[in-house]
Image (cartoon, rainbow, N blue to C red):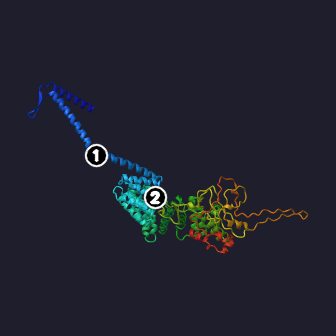
Amino acid sequence: MLRIVLFLLLIALAATGAAWVADQSGSVTLILGNEWKISATLQVFAVALGLLALVSVVIARILGEVWRVPGRLRRARHRRHSARSRHAITQGLLAVGHGDVAAARQHAEAARRHAPDDPLTLLLHAQSAQLEGDRDKAQHAFRALAERPDTRLLGLRGLFVEAQRADDVIAAALIAEEAIRLSPSSTWASQAVLGFRCARNDWGGALAILDANLEAGLIEKAAFRRQRGVLLTARALDLETRDRDVARASVMEAVRLAPTLVPAAVLAAKFESEAHQVRRAMKLVEAAWVAQPHPDLAEAYAHVRLGDSAQERLRRTEALAEKTEGHVEAALAIARMAIDAGEFARAREVLVPLVEDPTQRVALLMAEIERGEGDNGRARAWTVRAVRARHDPAWTADGYVSEQWRPVSPVTGRIDAFRWQTPVASLSSHPEVMIVASSLEADMAEPVRAPIVEARELPEPQPVCEPVQTLLLEAVRKTEGQVPLQQDNVEPEVVAEAEAAPKREEPAPKREESEPEPKREEPPTVAPPLFRARPELNKPRPIPAAIIPIIRAPDDPGIDEDGLGDEYSDQIGVPRAQAGGWRGFLSRWGG
């Protein structure tokens, strides 16, 4: 609206000026020297003056455009180079994303030609070098990024990754320290420094990093309380024998921050018990037990009062088990205390629901019960069974199994990564394929060496938890009964050894003296089968036909040939090569 008003005012002023010039009389005379004299009316002079101004503006505009032509050419060339570089960088990063090494290298070279100083060009060169596996070139590119003020943190991040890949722990720690000095809010740098300080048992430095993360908003309040409790527990465990006052203060704060943390509750209960604060110690253990039953908690609860008899410890453990009735750890805790008290019947009673599919701890407890009742044969049988039993829960983090709790995962460096759970290696990897090892025939002359077979129709053999010493039978059974091994999958020596084995003859049926002897037909010579099938496996199931090898789990102790003597093997009826190293197993799991 305002522009319209101003436009109308300008038109009115122009019209007023034109009308005033038209009303004026007279002329305008321009004299140039003595020879030139130009005379015109005022109206003609005004029109000529306007045309001269218009021509001057047009000429000035043309000269200005000509003057700006070189700059425009330079800017157009820069835009073309920038567009080509952006296209090369985009396509190069996409090639890096889907793993095309040749395309990534080609686009990186194109980006370097068009935009050598662009940070994204350096990043593309670094990532393409990483994709090729050229660590020197990748480090050179990341070092160039680290020297620029605007990309310094990005370069340090890349150098940190390369140092980790080269297993250079010292360089990785120094780079992470430099990165956190430049940017305290950097998540990867704070996590890396926190992991390095925990690895050096620098719990004070780790707590300082954790406090800085809370101030920077990198961690929530609940997670901060839990992680601080974990670090304080680790410091208390480290100082338990050196500085008990600091250890006690640390673990008491840890219990307040994380009351369900098992190691914190156990250590705090120990300190309270030594201070004759039995009721407070029992409350600490009970709070952690309800959240996560654990054998260490049951042990601490049973020995919370020093000098109690075994019967008193048993009654106290039964009271604790009532809080989580039906839990496996509750039954195992009662059985443990009952054995210590000599109540073998009570221990057997609580273990009855668990003996059908026992774990290693259940089998070892049953062995102790049998040994306490004087049956050494059954005790040895349960001990051998423990070697092949299912694994019990253990402290596990990122696939790593530890005998003791740790505050940080040794694989990823995460705080509070360890959980009390069954290790993955002991779980069945093929639920549709039941792999069973059967005993050899009783009349075989010698134990047959297990053949080495190759998996078929499976992408990759998977580990199984039981350390079975003989390899397995055919997965698909067409008929019931025993199925011989396929000779194309078995070593020729094993087939020859099986064929050379003695044949089993069935006793002839009794007949009357007057009855003529029937003509006997010679049965075909068939080698005795090496494996015995289970009836439940003879049902038709959609299982691919394959002979699958058993691969020992990473935590399997294997066979300890020196662990069992010939006398022991003869007593239990198991060949020495199949008996297993139960003494080594007991030393690992602590009975």
Splitting the image into 4 quarters, where does residue 48 fall? top left
Q: Secondary structure at mark 2?
A: helix
Residue type marked 1? Pro
Up the image or down, 461 lies above or below 41; here it is below
Left or right: residue 123 compared with residue 544: left
Residue 96 shows up from this direction: no
Q: Which residue is mark 2?
A: 132
Give the residue drawn at x 37%, y 51%.
114
**Residue 585's x, y, as percent?**
59, 69
Residue at coordinates 68% horizontally, 63% vertically from top-left? 438
Q: Which percent across, then down, holds residue 149?
A: 33, 57
Amino acid bearing label 2:
Glu
Of 86 and 544, nearer the camera is 86
**Relative image position of residue 353 (x, y in whole percent):** 64, 60
Q: Which mark is residue 310?
A: none
In the picture of the structure, the residue carrying the numbered disc 1 is 70
Residues at marks 2 and 1, CA–CA distance in whole angstroms? 43 Å
Residue 380 in view here: yes
Question: Mark 2 Cα within 10 Å, few/some/many (few <14, many 20+)?
Answer: some
Looking at the image, is 57 positioned above or below residue 548?
A: above
Q: Earlier in the sequence, mark 2 or mark 1?
A: 1
Nearer to me, 509 or 44: 44
Q: Is residue 579 left or right of residue 6?
A: right
Q: Residue furthest left?
A: 34
* Quarter containing the N terminus: top left
Q: Secondary structure at mark 1?
A: helix
Q: Residue at x 53, y 59 (%)?
A: 292
